[in-house]
Amino acid sequence: MKSETLSLSGALDEAGAMTVARVLNAVQGVSKVAIATADAKIKVDFNEDVTSLQELRTTLTQAGVSLKKVAHGEEGMCCGSCGG
């Protein structure tokens, strides 16, 4: 089981939060979704043997949810070549 926090590019209202929760809960392998509308963050618990963080990001993007661009080192995005 893996837990990741995704950052939205903007605020999310209650209707948007319900949509995000519905979309993510429909992905096989997702076990829990927690949304902090004030912080524009989504915490997702999922089975990484069934789905991936990239699949979750793609699913949200296809549903029209704008995610913050991932910076170096965030959300496990690091190739390791810089040593950072």
Image (cartoon, helix red, strand yellow):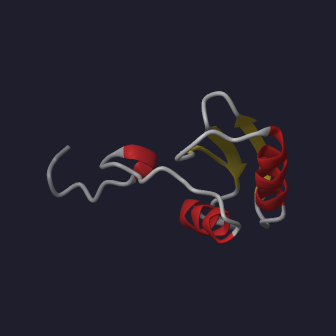
Tell me which residue sits at (33%, 46%) in the image.
Answer: 73
Position in image of residue 13 (x %, y %): 75, 39
- Quarter where residue 7 is shown: top right
Q: Is residue 27 above or below residue 44?
A: below
Image quadrant occupied by the C terminus: top left
Position in image of residue 65 (x %, y %): 64, 58
* Outermost residue toward the top in this view: 38
- Quarter where residue 3 is shown: top right
Position in image of residue 5 (x %, y %): 58, 41
- Which is nearer the eye, 28 or 6? 6
- Which is nearer the eye, 5 or 11? 11
Left or right of 10 in this view: 1: right
Left or right of 18 in this view: 66: left
- Which is nearer the eye, 9 or 84? 9
Tell me which residue sits at (34%, 48%) in the image.
Answer: 71
Tell me which residue sits at (60%, 29%) in the image.
Answer: 39
